[in-house]
Structure formats: structure tokens, C-alpha cells
Amino acid sequence: MEREQGRLDVLANSVAGQDMVLAGWEPIWKTDLARADLAVRQGLLSHVLTAKYAATLMIKKRHGLIVEVTEFDLLFCSGNVLAQLVKFSLKGLAVILAEELRKHRVAAVAMTPGYLRSELMLDHFGVTEENWQEGGKQDPNFLVSETPLFIGRAVAALAGDPKVLARSGQITSSYGLAREYGFTDYDGRRPDMLTHFAKEVLPSLKWMRDGLERHLAWLEDLTGVAREYLGQPRSATP
């Protein structure tokens, strides 16, 4: 890259995003760990390697954006323990990179798409991009899906923001950024998985609502600990 272009401005790091070695929804006691080292190497260490060399180029110009593509804009993920470990760690990687690269004016964020209408998902529903809405007959949530172009436009919007460094270390999403920057998918739609999830999915899934409540309590507790380290009251409210 340095020989060809002389610089690197943006890295959208999505290595092994849909690698089948991360497939499966089994609980930990049923998860096959025979290829655990491969899963971590391909899904996580590949990102570390790519980010290292990208950062090396960006530091020289004191400019750049590294985007770690992950799953969900919360800390937890889905899938078996290996998939969740990888996706969770990519969010942590963005935080680590953000702190290390801030003084070099290089930003790093984690970013998730919504319901991604990838080639794999099109094949899963037996549809094409031309008739993808037919997949909604099998899963109504698929009607809120987005193409890979949507998250690509999210990366581009973030990279074009002169204040992007202020967002370094954040966990972002294609749909969240679309609200802010106003971009759409190729067909003019602006799918918003978060709003759809809150209104249409969560009300019927008590186990997921309970999980989100625990997640919120965990985050609030962690925030309290951080305040104590800063010498502040643990609670922000009297």
C-alpha cells in the first residue's frame, strides 16, 4: 500500500466476518473446541495483524481511521462461545487502538451492521438481491436488512468527518451513523435495526429483555467503578 499509494487513510477491518469456523449456537458445554485456535487466529489475531500494519502507515501521516467490523453495538454478541469471544474482543481491540493511537491523531472504532443482507444470507433464504424481499416470508425481520454498501457508506461518512477523532474508541453502528449523517442504502432506504428491534422483536422475547436488563446493570456498575477511580461519587445522581 505504501509503495502503491504512499499512504493509507482508512482500514475497514472485516477479516473472517462470516467465517464458518465461527458458526454455531451451542452453549459452551456443547461447543466443539477442536478448531478453537483457528477461530481465534482467523477471527481475532488477523485483525490485530492488519491493524498493526495499517497503524504503522497512518502514524506517519498523523491521520487515519481504523474500523473494526463486529456484531452488535453492545458488549455482548451472539453465537457460540468462540464466536462471542471473537466479536467481543474486536470491540476491546478498538478501545485499545483508540488509546494507543490518539496522540498520533489516528481514530479507531468498532462498528456493526444491522441485519446484513450478505451473499451468505441471500443464499440462506434462497433469494437474490433482485427479489430479496421474498426472504421476508421466512423471516419478517429480513425486511429490515441492509446491503454491505450501507455499512460501507457508514465507514465513508465517519472517515469524512473532520471531528472523527472525538469518536475514537466508540462502538458504532451503520444504522446509528445513518441517522446522524443522512446516508441511505443503494435503494434509498434507511434501515434501522435498533428501532425495529425495540418495537417489533424485544417485546416478545422476555429472555432477551432480561439479558439486556442485566447488561445495563453491569454497565452502570462499571461506570460507577470508573467514577470512583476519578475520585467522584459512584452515583451520578444524589
Image: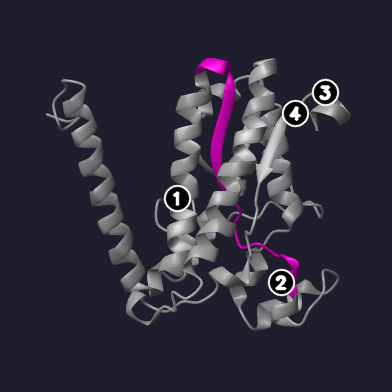
171 inside magenta stretch: no
Q: CA distance from mark 2 to mark 1?
A: 23 Å
Q: How is the image coloured?
A: one colour
Whether 182 is drawn above or below 69: the answer is above
Mark 1 or mark 3, which has the lower sequence index?
3
Q: Secondary structure at mark 4?
A: loop
Label 1 Cα neighbours within 10 Å, binned few <14 / some 14-19 / many ≥20 = some
Viewer-proximal residue among 209 and 111: 111
Q: Position of residue 201 (x, y in %)?
A: 47, 69
Q: Secondary structure at mark 2?
A: helix
Circle 2 sits on which residue?
120
Q: CA distance from mark 1 to mark 3?
A: 31 Å
Q: Position of residue 21 (x, y in %)?
A: 57, 71
Q: Position of residue 222 (x, y in %)?
A: 24, 41
**Which is in the foreground here, disc 2 or disc 1?**
1
Q: Amino acid at mark 4?
A: Leu
Q: Where are the magenta residues, as a range?
A: 103-122
Whether 171 is drawn above or below 207: the answer is above
Q: Amino acid at mark 1?
A: Ser
Residue at position x 53%, y 24% from top?
101
Q: Amino acid at mark 3?
A: Gly
Mark 2 or mark 3, which has the lower sequence index?
3
Circle 4 sits on which residue?
8
Residue at position x 72%, y 50% from top?
150
Please give the label number shown on residue 6. 3
Q: Are discs 4 and 1 less than 8 Å apart at CB?
A: no
Mark 4 or mark 2, which has the lower sequence index?
4
